[in-house]
Amino acid sequence: MRLTVFWERMTEHFGAGYADTFARDHVMSELGGRTVHEALAAGWNAKDVWHVVCTVMGVPREKR
């Protein structure tokens, strides 16, 4: 998954005003105690990060 697609999905689910805030502030144990931004910077694959976000935040299957 390209980062552009990842951010499009984040924006679609959380809204333009909250997607980046969530990605900067929400620490998830499933990402090794990292935020989305930290996980991506550490080299996590965007698709894997998206799957974690979907699981943790209950994103409906049809939007995954």
Image: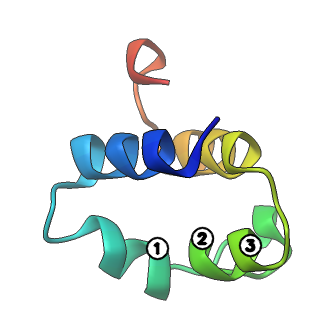
Crowdedness near tag 1: few (<14), some (14–19) or many (≥20) residues, C-alpha within 10 Å:
some
SS class, disc 2: helix
In the rendered view, would you say 18 is above or below 48?
A: below
Crowdedness near tag 3: few (<14), some (14–19) or many (≥20) residues, C-alpha within 10 Å:
many
| Label drawn at residue 36 | 2
Q: Position of residue 18 (x, y in %)?
A: 22, 70
Q: Residue beneath label 1, please? A: 23
| Label drawn at residue 39 | 3
Q: Residue at x 70, y 69 (%)?
A: 40
Amino acid type at image mark 2: Val
State how far apart marks 1 and 2 are (Cα).
5 Å
Q: Residue at x 59, y 41 (%)?
A: 2
In the rendered view, would you say 51 is above or below 60?
A: below
State how far apart marks 2 and 3 are (Cα).
5 Å
Q: Position of residue 30 (x, y in %)?
A: 79, 61
State how far apart marks 1 and 3 are (Cα).
10 Å
Quarter of the image where one finds residue 44? bottom right
Residues marked 2 and 3 touching at CB (< 8 Å): yes
Amino acid type at image mark 1: Ala
In the rendered view, would you say 43 is above or below 24?
A: above
